[in-house]
Each structure stands twice: as structure tokens, then as C-alpha cells.
Image (spheres, rainbow, N blue to C red):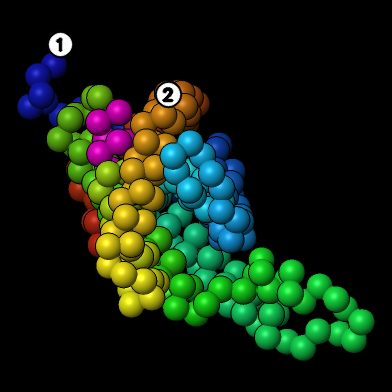
Amino acid sequence: MSSLTEKPPAVQARDLRTYRHFDTLLAIFIVVLLISNLVGQKLCSIGPFVVSGAQILFPITYIFGDVFTEVYGYSASRRAIWLGFLANGLLAVMGLITVWLPPAPGWKNQEAFQTVFYQIPRLIVASLVAYWCGEFANSFTLAKMKLWTNGRMLWTRTVGSTVVGQFVDTLLLYAIGFLGTAPVKTLAIGVASAYLFKVIYEVVATPLTYAVVGFLKRTEGLDAFDFKSNFNPFRFSPH
């Protein structure tokens, strides 16, 4: 049995387009991200939690982030995060434009359309900033923890990265989007409740994450370790 000081065998990285499942996973990731924004207006009661539709779907994007980083490496996750950010921004802008355009005479669904597609500009900024920072915090934490654990104990880094990433995401979302609109105590309770729900979500999803990661590592023939990766989120080269 190897010691904790030994490094796992390096796997030669290839162009992401040569992998069988990456593009499919990327497409699903972006679709889930966009849908989570469209269903965010609905409030749901789940046990002691009151959560939005977005809070039910959005944590899945963190599971995808874990999978991208764990299997394909930080650079693959960085690409997915940026594409998701651009898609999310485009959805928000087009939502604003189509809501602001005057409805055709006789079209009676303007109010319903606005309920689904309109977001207060402040909340758009909050959502985009929180998503970007939280996803990169999640990916960076997982990549580093994988090196620290020599690729062992996957659950420690899937949960640990979520603890960090969702904290950043939730705190920024409430601070940018809602600070000054409600008492600080009320916002703090909202942050705590949303954060706890997301972390529990990740813990419950751990067996599924294990299954997906194991399948992808076998079929792709890849288990990326970011020994020499550049963790600058603004670096757009493959490595």
C-alpha cells in the first residue's frame, strides 16, 4: 500500500473533445443551470426548509463541478464554469429585453411571462457574481484536496469543496442581492438555512457522485491530478 507522501500516477491530458462524455455532461450542466434560474420564483416547502425551485436544482451544478474537476481536471471545470456564466448572462439579458418589449395587442400573458423571465437587475448581478465565485471556489478546493489526499476518500473533497463553494455562493448572493432590503438577522437566517440545505443536499448525493465519477474514470481512461495546473480563473488555455 502506498504512503500518503507518494504521488499518484500522472495521466496524460488530451483535448477535451476527444473524451466520450465531456460534451454531453457540459450540455446537461448548462441546461440545469439555466432551468434553475427559470424555476427560481417558486417557493417550495421541504420538511423544515422553505426553498426556491432554484435551490432544488442549482446544487446539482456543484455536483457537476465536482465531476468535471475530479475526472477531467481544473481546466475542464474552468471551461464549464465560464460557458455556464455566459449562458446564464445571455438568458438574463434576453429575459429583460423580452419583458420590456411591449406586448402585442390581444396577448394577455405579459404578467405571467414577466413572473417567469423578469429578474431585478440587482439580483442578476448578485446571481452571476455568486455563481462565478462559488463555482471557482468549489473547483479550486476539490482540486487541491485531491492532491492533499492523493486521490483517496472522494467524499472528503466532494463535501469539503461544497462546504467552501456554497458558503461563498450563498453569502455573496444574499449580500449583493438583498442587503438593505431586510433586517440583517433575517438575511443571516436565510443564508444559514439555504447553506445548510445545500450542504445536506451534497452529502445525500454522495453515492450518486461516486457512481458517476467511477463510471467516467473507467470509460474515459482518465483520473486527472492538477499537479501543474494554473489555477488562474482567467486563463483560457487548456492547462
Circle 1: is it few (<14), some (14-19), or many (20+) Cα within 10 Å? few
| Whether residue 166 can be seen here | yes
Q: Residue at x 42, y 57 (%)?
A: 81
Q: Nearer the viewer, residue 230 or 95?
A: 95
| Whether residue 234 can be seen here | no
Q: Nearer the viewer, residue 185 or 116?
A: 185
Q: Residue at x 46, y 73 (%)?
A: 123
Q: Nearer the viewer, residue 164 or 25?
A: 164
Image x and y of residue 133, in percent: 32, 62
Image x and y of residue 232, in percent: 25, 62
In this rendering, the answer to whether 103 lies above or below 178 is below
Q: Identify the residue position indicated by label 1 in the image.
A: 1
Image x and y of residue 58, in percent: 49, 50
Q: Identify the residue position indicated by label 2 in the image.
A: 207
Residue contact between numbered discs 2 and 1, judged by CB atoms under 8 Å? no
Q: Quadrant of residue 92?
A: bottom right
Q: Quadrant of residue 30?
A: bottom right
Residue 21, numbered circle: none
Per the image, is 123 magenta?
Answer: no
